[in-house]
């Protein structure tokens, strides 16, 4: 029993390391987290992680049931990329527009804000990212296949370690930015939101090019 628990712990630690290497890379989920600090403070990180974890948990379940090969089909990844580009462009345009009009401030007030809420934003940013699917269809699928030797507990340990990496990193980011909020004037905050919107727009363009290229070459 003790040996089995140690093996599961090793799986979780390994998954944490693999997950952290991906979590620290800037991307849509990071942008949504930082954009929501003004509204949710340090809780932006945990809430975005929750949204991310919900869709990622469903994807891991699908992979455990054998969906990995489906996600590697060219028309599937290409279509995901194009749709994801549209979603990110919509999110980015809302952020840029509100920043330009001055409809947002560091206090997060104003129910008219079109910024995605943390949980929904975390889920949308994940679902819109074709590279997220590709990672899970390759590295993630291989990892899930290996840990399935330990049954459901192995898959759970892997998923728990992986999500913990996102939780630790995104919470650290939101904590750091939240601590500096008193130094963030409304003008600086609007600049941050606008910059993050442009960042998402760049990702949208990259995803669109990737999707079109994939569909054309399928």
Image (cartoon, grey):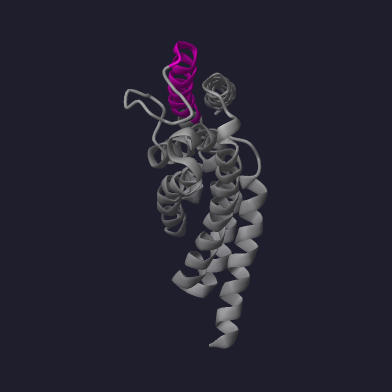
Q: Residue at x 53, y 52 (%)?
A: 167
Q: Give, as a single range, the part of the protein colored magenta.
A: 81-102
As drawn, which residue projects farthest toward the left?
Answer: 111
Whether residue 27 is visible here, answered yes or no, is: yes
User: 6 above or below 185?
Assistant: below
Q: Is residue 8 magenta?
A: no
- How many numbered discs sit on the rendered protein? 0
> Which quadrant of the figure has residue 194?
top right
Q: Is residue 100 magenta?
A: yes
* Position in image of residue 191 (x %, y %): 57, 20
Q: Nearer the viewer, residue 43 or 197?
A: 43
* Position in image of residue 59 (x %, y %): 44, 50
Q: Residue at x 50, y 31 (%)?
A: 35
Q: Nearer the viewer, residue 23 or 47?
A: 47
Whether residue 76 is visible here, answered yes or no, is: no
User: 14 above or below 196?
Assistant: below
User: 101 above or below 79?
Assistant: above
Q: Residue at x 42, y 39 (%)?
A: 118
Q: Is 148 positioned to the left or the right of 21 in the image? A: left
* Position in image of residue 155 (x %, y %): 49, 65
Q: Nearer the viewer, residue 187 or 97?
A: 187
**Please, what is the dominant secondary structure of the magenta stretch?**
helix
Quadrant containing the C terminus is: top right
Q: Residue at x 58, y 53 (%)?
A: 168
As drawn, which residue projects farthest toward the front?
Answer: 182
As drawn, which residue projects farthest toward the bottom?
Answer: 1
* Position in image of residue 108 (x %, y %): 42, 31
């Amino acid at each position: 029993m003790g040996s089995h628990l140690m093996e599961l712990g090793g799986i979780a630690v390994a998954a944490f390391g693999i997950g952290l290497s991906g979590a620290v890379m800037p991307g849509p989920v990071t942008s949504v987290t930082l954009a929501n600090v003004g509204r949710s403070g340090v809780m932006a990180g945990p809430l975005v992680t929750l949204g991310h974890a919900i869709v990622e948990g469903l994807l891991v379940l699908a992979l455990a049931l054998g969906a990995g090969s489906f996600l590697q089909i060219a028309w599937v990844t290409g279509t995901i990329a194009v749709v994801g580009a549209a979603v990110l462009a919509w999110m980015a345009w809302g952020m840029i527009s509100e920043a330009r009009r001055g409809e947002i401030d560091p206090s997060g007030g104003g129910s008219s804000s079109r910024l995605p809420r943390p949980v929904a934003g975390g889920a949308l940013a994940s679902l819109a990212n074709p590279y997220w699917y590709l990672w899970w269809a390759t590295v993630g699928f291989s990892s899930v296949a290996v840990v399935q030797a330990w049954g459901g507990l192995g898959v759970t340990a892997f998923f728990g370690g992986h999500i913990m990496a996102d939780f630790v990193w995104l919470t650290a980011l939101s904590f750091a930015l939240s601590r500096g909020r008193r130094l963030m004037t409304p003008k600086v905050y609007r600049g941050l939101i606008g910059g993050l919107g442009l960042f998402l727009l760049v990702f949208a363009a990259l995803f669109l090019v990737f999707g079109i290229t994939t569909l054309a070459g399928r």
